[in-house]
Amino acid sequence: MLKGNDEQALQEVESAQFVADSPDGPADFACSPPWKEKLEAEARSRQRPASEVQSPELPSETEGEPTPPGASSGEFRKGFRRPHPIAVVIGSVLFVLAASTGCIYWSYARHFESTDDAFIAARQIAIAPKVTGYVTQVPVTDNQHVAAGAVIARIDDRDYRIALEQASAQVAAAQATIQNIGAQIAVQKAQVNASEAQVEQAQATLVFAQQQSARYEELAQKGAGTVQNAQQYSSQLLQQQAALKSAQAALTVAQRQIESLKAQRSSAEASLAQAVAQRDQARLNLSYTIVTAAQAGRVVNLTASPGEFAQAGTNLTMFVPDEIWVTANFKETQLDSMRPGQPASMHIDAYPKRAIRGHVASVQPGSGTAFSLLPAENATGNYVKVIQRVPVKIIIDNPPTDVALGPGMSVVPSVRINAEPSLYERLASSIDHLWRHS
């Protein structure tokens, strides 16, 4: 496009006038052709200051709202952005309400410590038979709740009943042996009594023989008796002394026989005790053929089936007791004010609409990684400090009975670490007091 030549051409066009005659009289009528209007527009756009050029994104005038007379477009936009007094008041009120609500919530939330790293825990056990045999009956099914002592499975008990009968027969035989030895001891005691009587008789005969021998010895010395009589009674004295010794020896043998029988009875009593122990073991083995639940809980992952040959120690099912708790892994920075006995509220992910109550039972004396299979060795390599997690045991005070809770279910516990009422609780208490007395 031309610059200087365009301005000159525009001046020439503006100086030329085309006048048309009119029936009413001469009149000046400026007729501008289209090429003239185009040149005029280009000239005006070049002469307009940059400050007056409007952005295509911000129109100078709003459609349907003409610019007020005597006011430029910039002044109009400036007046349009001026804040309205009512809007200022409403915004201020909303800000005050938001700030007050935030302060109340902060005052309430600082009384609690919460974590989402928490799970239900239990000491689940594996139920296995203690004896070997074929499974004859499984009266439970998967996930069934059973009471303490309920039958989980039955094993064929015929072999164990026979073993119990054999052990009982051995006990009876041992008892009979003891009774026989007892009778022998009684007989031997009578023999001892007889031997004692013989000893007494021999002693009396010996005394008489001593007297006779002394008498006839004295008569023989005085010449009133014969030497033959003195020798005869002297011989009888020696015989009576030998008879006394024999009776005393027989008494000793009889007494020693009693001791021997007593020793035999002790051996028989030991055999009886062994037989009784075998009988008790056989009775226990028979009782082991009935696999029962030691406590109330739920049967989980049942694998036993009738006709299966179960080895001793083979798992028949897993068992989850009713005694469950929550293991919450709090950060170590959250334990400053946490103590056993503090109340806690819990929300279980599986049942979000149920409010579960509990209390802190204990805090583990050490982080979770310290008791893991492969604990961290911070003394080796580069060390980066990381906030540790410490397990906290929370007891459930009101466990639901109509739903199943088991190990591994996610829980979000919140422990109240400050027993003093918060600002929200004080306000709620005041409002409730005023409402009741109004």
Image (cartoon, rainbow, N blue to C red):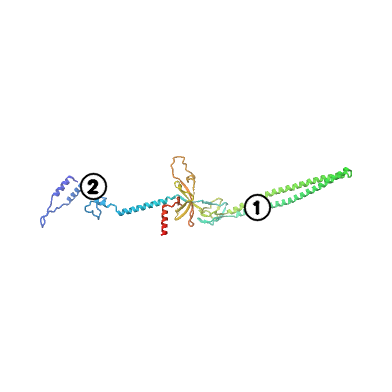
Residue 415 appears left or right of 93: right
| Residue 40 can be seen in this image | yes
| Residue marked by disc 1 | 171
Circle 2 crowding by C-alpha within 10 Å: few under 14, some 14–19, many from 20: few
Q: Select label 2 or label 1 by which is in front.
A: 2
Question: Residue 323: x percent and y percent?
Answer: 51, 53
Give the SS element for disc 1: helix
Q: Amino acid at mark 1?
A: Val
Answer above or below: position of 357 versus 224: below
Q: Quadrant of the C terminus?
A: bottom left
Answer above or below: position of 189 versus 437: above
Q: Amino acid at mark 2?
A: Ser
| Residue marked by disc 2 | 51
Question: Residue 51: x percent and y percent?
Answer: 23, 47
Relative depth, front residue between 27 and 132:
27
* Residue at screen point 42% across, 54% down: 426
Relative depth, front residue between 353 and 341:
341
* Residue at screen point 42% across, 59% down: 437
Residue 358 appears left or right of 163: left
